[in-house]
Image: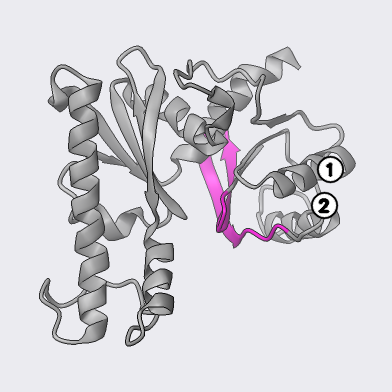
Amino acid sequence: MLLTIDVGNTHTVLGLFDGEEIVEHWRISTDARRTADELAVLLQGLMGMHPLLGDELGDGIEGIAICSTVPSVLHELREVTRRYYGDVPAVLVEPGIKTGVPILMDNPKEVGADRIINAVAAVELYGGPAIVVDFGTATTFDAVSARGEYTGGVIAPGIEISVEALGVKGAQLRKIELARPRSVIGKNTVEAMQSGILYGFAGQVDGVVTRMAQELADDPEDVTVIATGGLAPMVLGEASVIDEHEPWLTLIGLRLVYERNVSRM
């Protein structure tokens, strides 16, 4: 089986693939202070519960693919693969890794690994032109051309950090649950904030994607818009431009990159 690990700023998502099928997944908090040994214990605890894997760390794992937006965690995961999975082929997404997606940016090295991986999966699953909207710590919009090239994107504050900022900076506001309000016009402060977050972000998605699609293709209707990320389900019903929802887009991209690189190792 292939273990895929997507390390984000807030959460880390792990997926277990049997061929092309994802058979198990986990979501944990990202903690830059965790050491390689602590990460190994955590992995053993999670995977030890799966019936298709053995009791010992590494039993049943035939490959590992990792991408990370947190350099310190990537460093520790590199040590995990060396110390605890020494005989298992491991692909860490970083400069020099073959993705199959040309990066048309002023400085390709500054693009987050997860954004490139999302583009890889989008091209494979839906073709181009496409726009990937990833609802994570930041809300990112990534453009893929008709020829499968990563052409750039947009970065906006994420839903959770916007809610947190309102609670911290608003003298009469507080942290709220991310939930759908009874109506757009809130009848109390909590519902008013929930409405502003939900419909505000839905409007942001529609506005940004519409403008990107006009630049990306002669006919904006040709652009496939894919939503992913842990908070995507909150906005799906309100954003009118989203065509597809693929919650495991990054993990699928990691599987594809692993397959494209493991034969070269």
Q: In the rendering, which numbered label is found on residue 79? A: 1
Q: In the rendering, which numbered label is found on residue 36? A: 2
Q: Which residues are magenta?
A: 8-32
Quarter where residue 184 is shown: bottom left
119 versus 14 height, above or below: above
The image position of residue 93, as x and y in percent, is 64, 31
Task: Name the residue: 34% across, 53% down.
Answer: 232
200 versus 222 height, above or below: below
The image position of residue 79, as x and y in percent, is 84, 43
* Labels 2 and 1 touching (C-beta < 8 A): yes
Compare residues 106 and 220 and report the one nearer the observer: 106
Q: Is residue 140 left or right of residue 64?
A: left
Assess whether residue 176 is covered by the magenta stretch.
Answer: no
Disc 2: CA contacts within 10 A as few (<14), some (14-19) or many (>=20):
many
Disc 1: CA contacts within 10 A as few (<14), some (14-19) or many (>=20):
some
Task: Name the residue: 43% across, 51% down.
Answer: 138
User: Mark 2 or mark 1: which comes first in sequence?
Assistant: 2
Q: Is residue 138 left or right of residue 76?
A: left
Give the CA separation, mark 2 to mark 1. 6 Å
Q: Amino acid at mark 1?
A: Glu
The image position of residue 108, as x and y in percent, is 54, 23
Q: Amino acid at mark 2?
A: Ala
